Amino acid sequence: MDLTKRIGQRLRAARQEQKLSLSDLSSRTNSLSKSRISNYEQGIRRMGLEEAHELSMALRTVTPTYLLCLDDKGPLDAEEMRLVEFFRLSDERGRATVLEVAERQSEFGVAAKAAAAEEQEQAPLVEDELSTA
């Protein structure tokens, strides 16, 4: 499948996930008509960077790079959206706090995954020792 069609499918899926009509999405943008958005979705016309940015801001759940198939980080789930909304509503100090907590938490996640992987690697050794005893 060509890139223009894949881009259109991503846009359509993001719009439909929010149960938005073409008119609804168009009204959330500054300059995109429903026929233009429909052309993007059908793969008739490929959106540019500006349009991808405008549509991602209107949809609020996808990034321009996701829409343009430059990354595969899909739409945000409800919990992720809440976090983004809280971040956006925060002042500078609140944003710094949110980022600090997220960084610390991700370090714990990486450490936990490493420990689990190490434990899994050692499990066969224990079984081998038991079978040879």
Image (cartoon, rainbow, N blue to C red):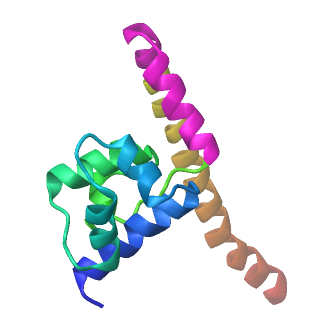
Residue 62 seen in this snapshot: no
In the depicted structure, whether residue 80 falls above or below residue 2:
above
Residue at image point 30% right, 81% down: 5
Magenta stretch contains residue 84? yes
Which quadrant of the view contains residue 131?
bottom right
Judge left or right: residue 88 versus residue 2: right
In the depicted structure, whether residue 93 falls above or below residue 121:
above
Total numbered badges shown on the rendered structure: 0
In the depicted structure, whether residue 26 falls above or below residue 89:
below
* Residue 36, image x, y percentages: 25, 63
Residue at image point 19% right, 71% down: 46
* Residue 17, image x, y percentages: 56, 60
Residue 106 seen in this snapshot: yes
Query: Residue 25 versus residue 12: which sits nearer the camera?
Result: 25
Judge left or right: residue 55 versus residue 109: left
Query: Residue 28 versus residue 69: which sits nearer the camera?
Result: 28
Residue at image point 63% right, 41% down: 79
Quarter the C terminus occupies: bottom right
* Residue 35, image x, y percentages: 30, 65
The stretch in magenta equals: 78-97
Query: Residue 34 versus residue 61: which sits nearer the camera?
Result: 34
Magenta stretch contains residue 20? no
* Residue 113, image x, y percentages: 58, 55
Which quadrant of the view contains residue 4?
bottom left
Residue at image point 48% right, 56% down: 75
Q: Main secondary structure of the magenta part?
A: helix
Quarter the N terminus occupies: bottom left
